[in-house]
Image (cartoon, rainbow, N blue to C red):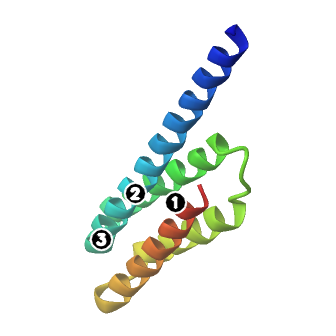
Amino acid sequence: MAKVVETEIKQKEAGKKSFNIQEEVKRLGNDVDSLAKKTGDEASKLAKNINGEIKSLSGEIKSIDVKDEVKSITSKVEKLVDATGDNAKKLASEIKVDIKKLIDKI
């Protein structure tokens, strides 16, 4: 009986962790929108934060291989720092699609 309860608790904790990770990744989508509107030092700082969070999330997600997704997102975020206007909007949209794929994979 104790093992059943212990297993249920572990499953609930895993479910909460997965939900929290998905929420964090969704929030990063909003940060990408903000990045598309920023320039200069503000953009560089925000890009570093976004990439740092994406990389730390990949460390938390050990049961799923997300290296390719993380690499794709972080490289596009770096490009977004230098993009402006329609190019920035297009790139931000591509990043958000990649983030959506990452959420679906989680």
Q: Which mark is residue 103?
A: 1
Quarter assignment of residue 40: bottom left
Whether residue 41 appears in this view of the structure is no
Residue at horizontal 52 percent and vertical 74 percent from the top: 76
Q: Which mark is residue 26?
A: 2
Residue at horizontal 62 percent and vertical 15 percent from the top: 5
Q: Amino acid at mark 3?
A: Thr
Closer to the chain start, of discs 1 and 3, is: 3
Tags 1 and 3 touching, CB below 8 Å: no
Q: CA distance from mark 1 to mark 3?
A: 27 Å
Residue 82 percent location from the top left of the image? 41, 78
Closer to the chain start, of discs 3 and 2, is: 2
Q: Amino acid at mark 1?
A: Ile
Quarter assignment of residue 7: top right
Tags 1 and 2 touching, CB below 8 Å: yes
* Residue at disc 1, secondary structure: helix
Residue 103 percent location from the top left of the image? 52, 60
Q: Height in image: 70 above or below 87?
A: above
Q: Which mark is residue 39?
A: 3
